[in-house]
Amino acid sequence: MHHQAIIIIIIILSLYFLSLLLHKIFRFFKINGFIILSFFIAFYLVNLYFKNLFINFLSFSIFIIILIFIFYYLFLIIKNKKTNFISLNYNYLNPKIYNELNIKAENIPFTFPGIYFLIKFDIYNENNLADRALVTVRREKEKLEFKYKFNMHGDFTIKNIKFILRDIFGFTEFSYNIRSTFKITVYPYYNDNVNVPFFNNKDGSEILQSVIRINSTDFFENRKYYPGDDPRKINWKIFAHIKELHVREIEKIPPKTGQIYVIFAPFSDFDIEFEYITSLFITTADLLLKYGIELKILSPISENEIIINKSNESEFNNIINYSFKKINIIRNKTIDNAIFFASFYEYSRIIESNLIKNSFAAITFFDDDNIKINDLALFLNINKYDSLIKDFIEKIKISFKTKKRYNILEKINTISENNKIKLEIYKTGNYFETKNNS
């Protein structure tokens, strides 16, 4: 018995020093898996003494499998040709859906049975970390293809890229850093369910009605048609009335149609709200700009308003892509006749200041009817990449947060009525579904 104890102690000490050596080697070559390898070496050696054939076979088989993977990694190290990412290619990117992307690369490792590729990267919006990603990639000749779902739109930088090789059992992993960085743009959605408000103000009655008149034939000088005149200039509308041919001669400069004050405050804890209110804002703003209306926009990117018209679309794009922070409204007087595009959070925060009056407000409200805390389907809906507990806790948090927001909604409606603000609520779940409440 004493003899057996000495043998076991010697084995344990030997394995301890072997583990330290493996740890140093693996860390130097950036290979993970030494703990599992050490465990199965120990497991195998201990079972040699107890002579359990099945356990010996199992531990030895796993030990050999891990060694094969490690030799594969060591071969790549000796070969000394690290993968280099040349370019990131994609089509039109949208948030909240899986987008197809591919990386043109050189020196991609040869495919080995039981090994698959991943890439890990950080996504930055300006200098702010927006997301961290770990995605499986598939090799297609000299390209690495993968799918990724961006949480929100905007201009992003992908950096801190790591290329990872991992075995299918999860025993080992080999990785190295990629120095490349990539710039990408994720575009927001257009939304066709927008009711564009009409305003009466000192610049003219019914802004959009005046725009319609600008595009009519009433703003042309007309004279009688003479042989030789360009028939394309014939005013057929006048001919239909008086049965005489007239041609349009001189175009008048259309009168100014007015300027609309717009507040854009999309910040939200829910990405879907952020995207939805942005889509409503873009669709409305694009329509107004198309009709030649000038927009005076207050947004999170500046404490001052920015005048937007057809001539400075780049500034408009900056407003769209960089308005991911809370808006800062500093005013000594109220704002009248404005269009207010805001998430529920931003609207409920700003409306209490009573700075906005006689305006129109479109707000988004996250209300997922599918959230049920006691829903058994939540536990049954498991797939390879789900984190069950994390998903369940997140749904509980959202459910409680939504109930709290419903209590605030009644207060918001009252304040809006007192300030003569026409409030339109766009409810959404995990997809864009419009439910309008005036």
Image: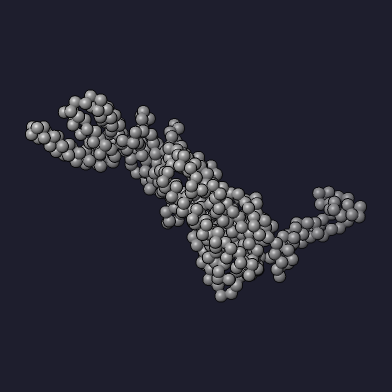
Report the side of 200 relative to 371 (left or right): right
- Residue found 43% across the figure and 42% down from its top: 386
* In the displayed structure image, the side of residue 394 where residue 432 appears, left or right: right
At which x and y percent is residue 102?
47, 39
Residue in front for this viewpoint, 354 or 194: 354
The answer to whether residue 382 shows anywhere in this view is yes
**Colour theme:** one colour
Q: Would you place residue 197 above or below residue 354 in this image?
A: above
Q: Is residue 67 left or right of residue 319?
A: left
Q: Residue, x 70% and y 62% (percent of image)?
A: 198
Can see residue 275? Answer: no
265 vs 35: above or below: below
Which quadrant of the figure has residue 195? bottom right
Report the label total: 0
Residue name at image x 84 percent, y 58 percent: 222
- The one of 309 and 44 positioned closer to us in this rendering: 44
Q: Position of residue 334 (x, y in %)?
A: 60, 72
Q: Is residue 69 above or below residue 297?
A: above
Q: Of all residues shown, which one is farthest toward the bottom?
A: 332
3, above or below 318, in the image: above
Give the residue displayed 65% in from the left and 51% down from the top: 193
For the N terminus, the quadrant is top left
The outermost residue toward the right is 243
Q: Give the percent coordinates (x, y) of residue 269.
A: 49, 56
x, y (%) of residue 6? 9, 35
Q: Quadrant of the C terminus?
A: bottom right
**Nearer to us in this view, 58 or 136:** 58
Query: Most extreme residue toward the left, as rendered?
Result: 2
